[in-house]
Amino acid sequence: MKKLSCYSGSFWLGLGATLLTAQLAMASGQSLLDKIKGATEPVDNTKIESAYTLTAKTVQAEETYQGGTFRVLARKDKITRYRCSVCHTDKKVLVKNGALYTHSDIAINHGKGQNKLECIQCHDEKNRDVLSDAAGTKIDFDHSYKLCGQCHFRQKRDWLGGAHGKRETYWAGERVIRNCTSCHNPHSPAFKTKMPETYSLPLDD
Amino acid sequence: MKDNKIDKSDPPENGRTRRSFLKGLSIAAAAGSAGLVTGGCTGEVASEEMGLKWEEYFKKNYRLMSQKEKDETVERLVKLAKIRVGVDIQMSNQAPINNVLYGYAFNISRCKGYMDCVEACVQENNLDRKSKTQYIRLFEMEPGKLDPSTGDGKYHHEVPVEDKFYMGVQCFHCENAPCIKACPTKATWREPDGIVVVDYDWCIGCRYCLAACPYWGRRFNWGEPQVPAEEINLKQHYLGNRMRMKGVMEKCTFCVQRTRQGKLPACANACPTGSRIFGNLLDPDSEIRFVLKTKKVFRFKEELGTDPKFWYFMD
Amino acid sequence: MTTNSRKGIISFVTDCAGWAMAGGTGFKIYLLALFGIIGMGAYAYYLQFQQGLIITGMSNIVSWGLYISNFTFFVGVAAAAVMLILPAYVFKDKDLHEVVIIGECVAVGALVMCLTFITVDMGGPLKVWHMIPGIGLFNWPSSILTWDVLVLNGYLALNALVPLYILYCNYNKKEPVGWRYKPFVFLSILWAISIHMTTAFLYQGLPARPFWNNPLLGPRFLASAFAAGPAIIMIVLIIIKQNTSYPVSVNIFQKLKRIIVISAIINLIMLFSEVFKEFYNFTHHSLSAQYLFFGLDGHNSLVPWIWTAIGLNILGTVLFAVDPSKCNPRYLMVAAISLFTGIWIEKGFGLIIPGFVPSPMGEVVDYTPSGPEIMITLGVLALGVLVMTLLIKPAIVILLEYKKSKAT
């Protein structure tokens, strides 16, 4: 019996010791958060070899990101009838073109109640080729974030840092992010309800 | 009759690089079994297929392969894909990028439940269409709760529903992953860039990892996975979206075939709302680091000590 | 070779084979039935091999089913041989020493079932060599599954070789030499406990599954095994007593009964303790238990099973504890079968399935084994029973002959 307990004791001790060592070996490794906190050296993302072939037109942002520069997707090439001043002249408008020329297809659904926006709160009253903010500063269509940010300053701060909006295709390489208007329709910025792209299988019945 | 075929089906460049003692054996056995299977009608192609399969059967675990062996198996898999499905795939075995540790953040106040991510993932990763395998699952959540397991994962109606929010789950690529610990054959492991991958050819299909995962991050191929040939994503990675076979485990790989080329994973790329933030945790200037620094973040089931590299945050 | 009377291994094997297959029409029909069931199972397995595990009832939610449930249970049955070995060799119990070989044959049969269940459950059974150290990669000591592989195969070797040695000696009308096999007997005692603890640790070590992640699981495995295992050994002994001239004394039944009663009571106490923990203060970790005992979200496929199991458990325990028949074989048969069935349900799919339901993502699905899955399971069970039969039959002949030769 003594022999038995001796055997059994050493067996379980052996098993325990092995498992414990395995655990300690794992625990002694740096924790994930320590590892992240410890990584303070800037990384040059442009050095990452990748087939960097962004076809979309981009412009250099007139803001800084973490002390460096970045690019945003251009907007002007997406506006079908830019430049606006082609139509917005002193010339008289024919009645038959009226519906088209007065942008009757645009419904402004931006801001609620008393704060509902009107065209000229964002578009420059004189020069239709640019936007202008509350202070009257002229803003290029490609840099609309400057205009949006005057009200949506929290979103702009997140957007600059990377918590709002998104990068275009690449996480590596030079930072190219989407403009406000890449995702939001400026005249009706809220996302629409729609059917989901797909569905997950009902797992039962 | 068989002997003629053996000679033809043994291209010199195929034999040169292999261990010679295996070669004779493998080709003979391959020809024999091919004859059995096909009845000899398309013998030549079939015996080439069997030869490739035979060599595939005896290959090592991916982590033990030299670069040359990795290239060889990729070459074989490309040939096999051509024979079986008739498509010309491009398969990579690109190694992790230095000084990169991938991390993910999910904005639960932005997600609208559109499921573009789920669909993009299915397309990108050649997921089985027959059983409708999905790596990502979106839950429609009742306000007042934060645990996705209390949400509805089967919704199919116009989204977003007012007063509901949406929460996505997938493999969280835990630093201390219970699945890796569970695997009896070391067929699943964490790459240096933090991605938890599966060597599909090494997996024996015991499903212990599936039982061990607290996040339901793994999917098993109960049958032969099926993707229409015209829908196959041809840009593949050995550890990523290459075609799986029945009886093996698979899972989200953070789209290793994309991310190692500097691209966003398909889900993050497809998201129309910008709820999905992906980047290098070791880069202090990355977006993911900005989120961790400036937002109040949390992880799912943090009490289990798995250290997932997937955080949830709110605006 | 040393003495003239000694017969070689070849004659041992051929004699054993002859004795194993010899028998009346009833026995022939019995063997034929077993082969029939195995054949059906083999055909179903062929289908599963061709099409994949999709032909089973398992899914990504309930990813282990009938196979692993039975595996878990029969590991217990295999381990239970220790309840004969321990008293027979450590406490030098004469009565149990008579039947210890039969207990070990039952253990071997159970182990064959276990290993076959594991194999049929695998998605890539042809890739098993990936686990062999040297040519494959063996994730030891990290993966508990590798521990289980080691202990199960080790236990099979111990339980096959020791009786084989003893029987071979007896076949040659010799007393086995103590130092040659006794160390292995003691080793097998520890090993028996370790196979069942390790199998429990497979589940117990998973924080992902709160239903299993419970320190009582291992001890409860042992308690239930030491009730169910001796119960099946008792069934086998009753069959032997009624069909052969092998003497099985009442004392043996008496002692087995005592072992069963004590283990069954401990098992019931632990069951009660678990139920108390789950339901006194209900947490979301108790959802699995709720699913098992009462059903969840309208899914209640396990509810009738578990209550049947608990009923049979209590019935069996009470029948054994009271026993007004003073070890009447028929009475014992009823008691043993009810206890065995009760524990089989409770520790088989009553343990495995609720571990997966609800899933970590809160999904509740019912699991129903498919036809082929049931056929494969029956085939594996029949294979184990066949192995047991073919081991026990020659063992009895050899032991009887040896007794006769000693008496003269």
Image: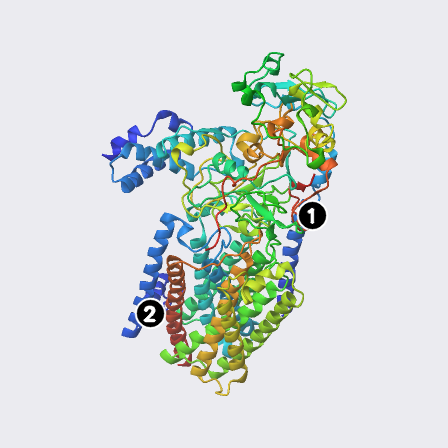
Of all residues, the one furthest to the front in this rendering is A95
Q: Is residue A151 above or below residue C158?
A: above
Q: Mark 1, chain letter?
A: A
* Residue at the spot of label 1: A24
Q: What residue type is labelled 2?
A: Trp
Report whether C404 appears left or right of A74: left
- The kind of secondary structure element at disc 2 is helix
Q: What residue type is labelled 1?
A: Leu
Residue B311 visible, this angle: yes
**Which residue is located at x 55 percent, y 78 percent?**
C261
Q: Is residue A130 above or below residue B47?
A: above
Q: How many labels does the image show?
A: 2
Q: Where on the picture, by quarter, is residue A117? A: top right
Q: In this view, does A73 lie above or below C83?
A: above
Of all residues, the one furthest to the right in this rendering is A135
Q: Quadrant of the C terminus of chain B?
A: top right
Circle 1/circle 2 CB separation < 8 Å:
no
Q: Mark 2, chain letter?
A: C
